[in-house]
Image (cartoon, rainbow, N blue to C red):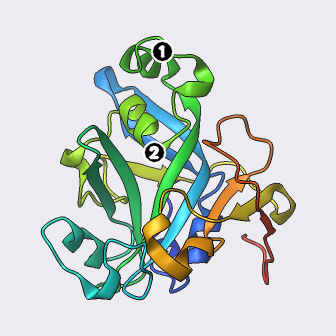
């Protein structure tokens, strides 16, 4: 079952980033098949106040305009002249919050992923935002795609308890001043598909359990 719009339009992007852990990202492949993976690592970005966000300071460009859409929209951008990265827009329109999906645990279409990743080991297929886009066939053509549609979507997956979740600083944002140390990265503890585990981690404190 696809996640409903209400899952994405919540005001707390940190809560959405946490709740995405264990859900299943799905992209249709050829012949009616799909490639899919369980989300095991995420990062929250809370523009416009978050200096690490593309929308910091209310910045609006052709690329960042997607972030100002309604929650449940795919935000895909190209970085380093090499890789695409897949994000989930959250909150309501004109509030530029987003969650970067950093790693997946492959569950469907693994042979397709291996071909796309040129025979890499299973643990290297989707352990990183660029890697997972290559394995899943995600590119800029999916930017602005509705996650309630049929081009890419997220389904309920496996329940993850608060005890299974770690959190720590986000990766690669040394320019973000005081925002560098915000523990806005979430991952499933001991999952071998997580891209990297920082030395400094924080326990996740939940006020309510996901249903």
Task: Name the one closer to the observer, 37 or 86.
Answer: 86
Residue labelled with disc 2 = 129
Q: Is residue 2 visible?
A: no
Residue at the extreme top of the image, as rendered: 119
In this view of the protein, which residue sits in the foreground, 195 or 159? Answer: 195
At label 2, counting other C-alpha atoms closer than 10 Å, the crowd grade (few under 14, some 14-19, many 20 or more) is many
Query: Residue 190: x, y in percent?
Result: 80, 42
Q: Residue at x 65, y 42 (%)?
A: 194
Q: Position of residue 112 (x, y in %)?
A: 42, 18
Quarter of the figure with residue 104: top right
Given the current orientation, which residue lies at the most extreme left position? 62
Residue receiving disc 1 = 111
Mark yes or no: residue 118 visible: yes
- The residue lying at 62 percent from left, 26 percent from top is 123
Whether residue 133 is situated above or below residue 187 in the rendered picture: above
Residue at the far right: name it: 163
Q: Position of residue 129 (x, y in %)?
A: 45, 45
Is residue 80 shown left or right of residue 187?
A: left
* Residue 6, above or below 188: below
In the picture, the disc for residue 160 is none
Quadrant in the picture for the C terminus? bottom right
Residue at image position (19%, 64%) is 63
């Amino acid at each position: 079952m696809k996640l409903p719009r209400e899952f994405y339009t919540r005001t707390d992007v940190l809560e959405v980033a946490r709740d995405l852990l264990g859900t299943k990202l799905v992209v249709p492949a050829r012949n009616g098949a799909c490639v899919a993976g369980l989300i095991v690592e995420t990062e929250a970005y809370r523009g416009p106040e978050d200096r690490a966000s593309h929308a910091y300071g209310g910045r609006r460009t052709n690329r960042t305009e997607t972030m100002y859409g309604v929650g449940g929209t795919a935000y895909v951008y190209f970085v380093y002249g090499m890789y695409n990265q897949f994000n989930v827009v959250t909150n309501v329109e004109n509030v530029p919050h987003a969650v970067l999906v950093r790693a997946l645990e492959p569950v469907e279409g693994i042979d397709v992923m291996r071909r796309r990743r040129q025979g890499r080991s299973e643990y290297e297929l989707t352990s990183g935002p660029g890697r997972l886009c290559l394995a899943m066939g995600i590119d800029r053509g999916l930017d602005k795609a509705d996650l309630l549609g049929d081009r890419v979507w997220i389904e309920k997956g496996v329940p993850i308890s608060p005890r299974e979740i770690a959190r720590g600083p986000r990766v690669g944002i040394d320019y973000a001043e005081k925002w560098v140390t915000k523990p806005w990265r979430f991952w499933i503890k001991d999952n071998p598909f997580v891209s990297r585990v920082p030395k400094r981690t924080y326990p996740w404190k939940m006020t309510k359990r996901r249903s």
